[in-house]
Image (cartoon, grey):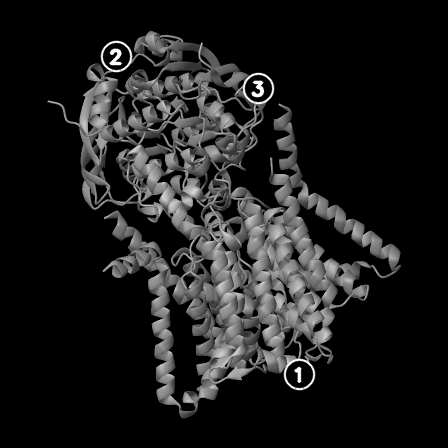
Amino acid sequence: MRHNSLLQRAGRLHSLQPLILLAIILVMILAQSILVPGSLTLDQLLIISRQASALGIIALGQAVVILVGGIDLSVGTTVMMVNIFCITGMQASNSRVPAGLLLCLGIGLMIGAANAVGVLFLNIAPFVMTLCTTTICQGICYVYTQGAPTGSAAPFIRAVGTGRLLGVPYSTVIWLGLAALLWAVLRFTTLGRKLYAVGGNPKAARLSGISNRKLIAGAYIFSALMATAAGLILTGYHNIASLTLEGDYAMNSLAAALIGGNAIEGGRGGVWGVVLGSFFMMLLMAMLTMLGISQVGKLITQGCIILAVVAVQQLLKRD
Amino acid sequence: MEYEYLQLLHITKKFPGVTALDDVSVSVRQGEIHALVGENGAGKSTLMNILGGNLQPDQGEIRLDGQSVRITSPIDAFQKGIGFVHQESNLLENLSVYENVFLGRERVGALGRTRRREMCQEILSSSQRLGYALEPEKPVSELNLAQRQSVEITRALLGKPRILILDEPTAALAEDEVERLFKIVRGLRQEGVSILYISHRLDEIIELADRVTVLKDGKLAGVLEREELDKDKLVRMMVGRVIQDIYPDRSQVQPGRELLKVDQLTIPGRLDQVSFTLRAGEIVGLGGLEGQGQRTVARAVFGDLRFTQGQITVENAVLKSGGIAERIRGGVAYVTHDRRGEGLVPHQSIRKNGSLATLERLSNSIGWMREGRERREIQEHMDSLQIKASSMEQLASHLSGGNQQKVMLTRWLMIHPKVLIIDEPTKGIDIGARMSIYQIIHQLTQAGIGILMLTSDMVELIGLSDRTLIFYEGRIVRELARDEVTEERIMKAASGITEG
Amino acid sequence: MKQIEQIRRKFAAAPQLSSVLTICGLLILVFLSMCGYSESYRSTYNITNVLAQCAPLACVSLGQTLVIISGGIDLSVGSTISVCTAIAARLMGGDSPAQVALGVAVVFLFAAGVGLVNGLGVNYLKVPPMITTLCTSTILNGVALWILPVAGGKINAGFARFIYKKWDIISMPLVLLVLLFLATRHLLYHTRTGTGLYAIGRSRPIAQSMGVKTRAVSVRAYVLAGLCAGVTGLLLACRMRVGDPTCGSSYGMDSIASAVIGGTSLAGGSGLLSGTVAGAFLIGMLSNVMNILEINQFYQYVMKGSLLIAAMVIYSISGRLEVRRRAS
């Protein structure tokens, strides 16, 4: 009996992860407002939330891919590619926005579909396949721009990236809206049930008549589309075409999803944990910047945090 | 009194919800063939895992040569002179025979260089002594099951064991291979090795064993000397009650209309023109040695395997090749033999596991789950199947084997099946739960469901099936009705021997 | 006759062997057609250069192969290489041999240390190999920037010349590669550790039950991968004569590609070192050819990614055919 309750407690701890994360975020905010008095205002938080929204949207896609037992390392490059083609496609003019949007949508679909085909039909390990698409897309971007991209975003895209709705940035609204939608799907629909089953035990799902391939393919395409949306928002926000925009989105989205309580082997996790995870990552980066810690420190912190979180998850999992 | 080399004293082992072994003592004399018998779930495998170092007993003592020992790991067992030949092949297919035999204790020379030639030579000489031919450099992936077993035996004997455990060694062997194995085992006895022999097959045990220890429901049921051995006596001790008490009485069953018809089903290399029918309210048992095509048929009927020729008809509707979802809609259900591997989603609740195959029925047109209805239906099944759990939100991984199996049954009963395929219905399930599962199966047939049962447990096959189909090399070689089925006939047919 | 039978057996035992031969054939084909195409390509000078240029990738790929055979993966080798060049550039600029020796020692110690951290993370913290090495990779990227914010520093010129010494067609990097190849070959095919690597790559639980010290063996694979990355780091540093905190970034992917093209299965448990070397040379030569043909260097990204996908597709198809052949 004791054994049982211990197990259950460990399981509960796992689902408590988002709450623990929320507590940590609150402590961080508190610490900052004590350390640097007056630095923390509501506006400041909203700005951080805007910075976090791109990462947050990508992390939603990443979370779904992880949920079905995969991994998507190509999200960063998708952002970059969308950024470059969005700017050249729209030529800074609002009249060409629909065509540009279609182009970006096509790019996202292509990348997602390529990943899905590689993983499902060519039986290539997810991270290798997505690494391959990353490399290929990078090559395409470099060749296309000759290494020196130029141009700026269309006013409409700029508005999306920088505008505010009742004081709240549009991008934050989009992020939270998408999160709420995804939450409803995962929590209340057959699609959500199937996604969890496929991640938790793909063979069992298959023997229950669930079409694993469609769901996994859908997850990769969803992830690529989320990256596309994030790419558009970032383009609007930064207003430049850049070959370094991909940043560390692959790593950071992975970190956000894992910190938020998603299990790397799939089948477990929720949406709000991921939302908090993204916010946490951005808050951390913002605080590191504020404390004058450079890129070096950020990279090291990022690596250590993911390693620690997954290690703790694995420790808890051991019976 | 001969010297008792190995003594297991008052061993107790508990798992969550189940006492697998309760104060069991077994002693093995030097140079004897000691058989260990018991039904599924009697505690044999737990005892062997304790002896083999995979599990630690909660209480009790193991004595080797009079010394109290603790066996901490498989390697430790090996070093203490306990050799283990597993039921399921425990070899690495990507390595060659000699690498498998010597893995973990390679002969090495200067600079850590392994001495391949010396190892191969050693294998050749030891295999010749035992009377079989092994090619040491051949990859294990190219060996058949009998040859793989020889590799395992060679490996076990390499450590010059004083005790050799053979766990269901004949489950996958044909009769001539069984004969050869017996010769080896007897030869080893001559050399003073004690053999602990585990088997379901009582005829074999009566032929081979010097003494028999019988386990029942995790307790010691008794020890018989060679001269006392008698099949009926063994069965009584194993079962502890008359067979009729365990298995529902099905002598009065009248099968109804034809539900499933399999006609000339062929998958090249695996199935050869298999034909049979299943009627409403009938239990048809598929038996035979392991891997002779029983599971292949079941999977083909369930739409998991494509077949090139033949036809499967459910209630006069011809099913196309492939497509599990389509089969489920057609009323075919399949309870897998591997609950953990491909049955349950371990981190999800009973409720979510139970409704996994019926999501479409439990949701509205846009895919929104009707959770109230889901809860109600799951609760009904939990009550009628008597699933013991704190609530329907308990995680499947926290349930005992019997309750897990009932969750699997829940999932499949939710689709209102016409044909229910049950693969190893009581594997890893203790006796109490087993009886209740037999009762459930019986009740289902009374409700008009046709049941196709696959089992490697001969007693179960005989006790439950209305008709038994014996497979050999992808064909049905014998069909036995309830009144003509015997263990001997099954064994003969399963080894490919045709009777007049 | 006996020899033929032996060869036949060897093929049967390792189906990858035929793929190695295919790649070698491809290599020769590329080489000969380039020789026909370009005068300058035929020169001894160029051939020596091409061989020397391929050596660094081949070295790191050998280590990667060991890890992949053991059922893991090491995405951190690229960053390890970067850090190694940075360390070398910081420490090996002086003229005294002692300083150079110190630099070499520190580089190898560091590389082994990274491997050890990876191995411990994978085996004791139970973090999946991909995540562990991705994390160490990120951390090492930071470390590289910390040691050397931009490309710079200096490598002792004498040492660098020694490492790139050439005799006709043979060059020092090639000699080092052959030595490293022989050492890893001995380890993989003729020691207990080697058998253990194949064993844990196939199935850890079975290997463990058969007495393989799975953790120790696996940790060794990661340490060796680290050391191989260290060799590559030194070779690159000596070639550039400076350190570069980002120079290794493509090597993680490329080393995996070499191994996979050479027939190593990402599922673990099978693979050949000679295949890996052939794979590395194929990638190296194709890059070189693209340079000579003056194709935009960015196409190399596309080439490598496509090559890796193609290799995996071909192996997965031939694997399926093999299974089907055995079944019937």
User: Left or right of C179: which side holds A277?
Assistant: right
Amino acid carrying label 3: it is Glu
Query: Distance from label 1 to label 3 (Cα)?
Result: 70 Å
Amino acid carrying label 1: it is Ala
**Res. B251 mark:** 2
Q: Chain of mark 2?
A: B
Q: Disc 1 marks which residue?
A: C157
Q: Chain of mark 1?
A: C
User: Left or right of B438: which side holds C148?
Assistant: right
Q: Chain of mark 3?
A: B
Amino acid carrying label 2: it is Ser
Q: Position of residue A210 (x, y in %)?
A: 41, 44
* Residue A11 vertical placement versus C16 (above, below): above
Q: Tell me the SS state at disc 3.
A: strand
Viewer-nearest of discs 3 and 2? 3
Query: Distance from label 3 to label 2 (Cα)?
Result: 47 Å
Which sits in the foreground, A46 or C71?
A: C71
Viewer-nearest of discs 1 and 2? 1
Q: Residue at x 68, y 67 (%)?
A: C105
**Res. B61 mark:** 3
Q: Tell me the SS state at disc 2.
A: loop
